[in-house]
Amino acid sequence: MKSFLSIALAAAVAASPCPYGQMAERGELSAEDAAKFFKARSEGETFVKRDMVDVTKREEHAAQEQFYKRQILGGLLPLGGGLLNGVLQPFTGKLSLLAVPTPQPFGLKEIPGDDAAHQYQAPGKTDVRGMCPTLNTMANHGYISRSGITTFAEAANACQTTLGFGYDTCTFLSGLGLLTGGDLPSGKYSIGGADSRVPNTLGPSLGISRHGFFEVDNSISREDAYFGNQADFRLDRFNRLVGIADKYNGEFGNSAFAEERVLLYNEAKNNNPNFDAGVRWLAVTTAERVFIFRALPNGTFPEFADYQNVAPFYMNETFPEEWFRRATPYSLANTGTDIAALLASSSELTVPGQNQGLNNFVPLGLDISNATPEQATCFLASSVFDETPGFISPAFANAADVVTAFMNGAIKPFFAPFNCEAISSNSAPGPNADSSTTPGVSTDCNVLVNGEYTC
């Protein structure tokens, strides 16, 4: 009750039509008195926003705690994990060595600023880089290992520190990276292709550039796997996006991506006989685009993603000069809202399905073009819990309990507040899971300078 009274009081003060406030707004006070008034009102508004965030967090934590209790009673956390007070709990047994991410401080901050430990260094010959520009950038600045061999906890923590994304979003993304091509017991994975520095405890660790999960057709800056190396940056593809953004005042925003994603969809559908536009594809390609205009703008001007701030991540894999991260965490709920908006604003439906040869596109019968934000957030969950078991290596079939325990303990709880049907159950990997053992690709040259590889 005290919290709500505080909110009401602060809001009343902040928006009060009192004569003193009206005089300040009409310019009838001295400059000194007006400055004092506006400072006091600003502090009141900040208090309101901060306290509202605290209320929202308490509500989310309560939902997570109830979900945690249900998981415990149902025997769904046999190897630990789960969320309490918004933080993942330690794992046990076969996952006892798996370190979990921790919430990092947030707020407007220059990255890397003058921090000597995080200045740009070009990757060396043995350093792995892959298809994700932001992960490559984090590695080039030492926020994750400069080798490109990272861990579940390290990448999630770096995501929070550098981009200002929320603990839930960063843990979810790093958890998918680990499931995609890493080693669950150690938590290690390669941000590029398969690498001997990542153990193969439960089966082949193929790296996150492996085609089909994180790396999918229709990438903004990488070509479809059918046509060549799906991990390398392609300047021609990025320049096409730049040209589209120029039509929208140079903004890499919702309008530009609503046009660009339809263009790439039709191009792949008409030319790539192996074009795979499944559930994961729809989740990844939409999230990839909204992350650009939520993660890459300068935090001092957070609503405008322009060339100056987007291009360095792609063309040089470095942070822009005098670049500040987001001031407020970007959550999974925010992601769902933006995905729904992007799908709704696209000029035509990008129907999920698969090419079985050219001119033979088989639709899946799935349409989320009019999804609500909550439905779009749940769609992210379904892309994991419905689809992951069919993607990971069949070698994991002998360790289905470990895979399921990790998904239950590290990913599923973040979706508890959304009442998603997809998190009620998930199947385990079996002998009919993806039999491909083709690793993600890595190249001998990983140094990007102005969009060209230079070694």
Image: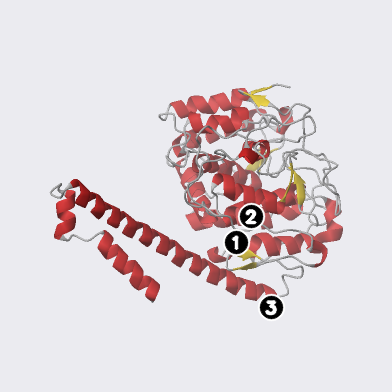
User: Is the residue marked by circle 3 packed among few (<14), some (14-19), or many (20+) residues within 10 Å?
Assistant: few
Measured as percent of width and height from the top left, residue 135 is found at: 65, 40
Residue at 51% in and 51% down: 330
Residue at the disc numbered 2: 171
| Tag 1 near tag 2, CB within 8 Å | yes
CA gap between label 3 and label 2 equals 24 Å
> Which image quadrant for residue 238?
top right
Q: CA distance from mark 1 to mark 2?
A: 9 Å
Secondary structure at numbered mark 1 = helix
Q: Could you tell me how many numbered marks the image carries?
A: 3
Instruction: Return the x and y of residue 187 as percentages of the image width and height.
Output: 76, 53
Amino acid found under the numbered disc labelled 3: Leu
Identify the residue at horizontal 58%, vertical 41% (top origin): 288
The answer to whether residue 431 of the structure is visible from this angle is no
Q: Which SS class for mark 3?
A: helix
Q: Residues within 10 Å of mark 2 (few under 14, many from 20)?
A: many
For mark 1, what is the residue?
414
Q: Residue 323: where, in percent of width, then height?
A: 51, 37
Query: Which secondary structure lies at badge 2?
Result: helix
Q: Which mark is residue 73?
A: 3
Q: Is residue 108 left or right of residue 115?
A: left
Q: Nearer the viewer, mark 3 or mark 2?
A: 2
Q: Please, is residue 223 above or below residue 384 in the view? A: above
